[in-house]
Image (cartoon, rainbow, N blue to C red):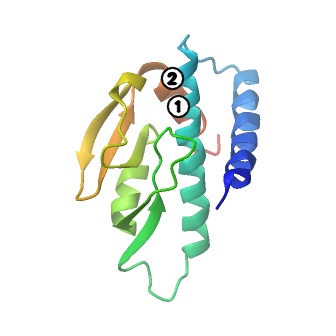
Amino acid sequence: MGASWKAGWATGLRTRWIRKQAAGKHRAAMSERTERLAENETVFRAGNEAIEANRRGAPDGGAGERLYLCECGSATCFEQISLTRAQYEAVRAHPARFLVARGHEDESAGEVVVADGPAYVVVEKAAAGRQIAEDTDPRDDA
């Protein structure tokens, strides 16, 4: 997976974001850094969603651990995190939550640690970053 993969996802997410803006959803004013980090996190979340969609119907029936991408805001992070599908689904049950490798959480970017595992933490975006996370949730077809 290279940078071009990320650029493609970012373009798609940016398009979806513009569409939702036109539909009347407006985000609160935020710093450019917070906005960029939130958008980067949504790119990795969308990547994990695409990977998971390709795994559905796998011979293992969803049992066992799988690798997921760290969903931190760093555009250069490609760290992988091992967890079960059930653990991943627990994170994805909340559109403002992201799976990040331990040590990759960034409280200065408006996120709070809400759960942790052996090699990962789950962060929840707050305020304006939360709005971006919710507006770009790949599971929200509205």
Pick the residue in front: 87 or 40.
Answer: 40
Q: Whole-percent x and y of residue 7?
A: 72, 45
Q: Quadrant of residue 22?
A: top right
In this picture, residue 39 sits left or right of residue 67:
right
Quadrant for the C terminus, please: top right
Q: Residue at x 44, y 86 (%)?
A: 60
Q: Is residue 67 above or below residue 16?
A: below
Q: Residue 85, relative to residue 62: is it above or below?
A: above
Q: Quadrant of residue 48?
A: bottom right
Residue 4 is situated, as x and y percent measured from the top left of the image, at 74, 52
Q: Nearer the viewer, residue 49 or 4?
A: 4
Q: Position of residue 70 (x, y in %)?
A: 45, 52
Dot 1 and dot 2 residues touching (CB under 8 Å): yes
Residue 23: assigned label: none
Extreme-front residue of the structure: 76
Q: Mark 2 = which residue?
A: 34
Q: Nearer the viewer, residue 19 or 70?
A: 70
Q: Which residue is mark 1?
A: 37
Q: CA distance from mark 1 to mark 2?
A: 5 Å
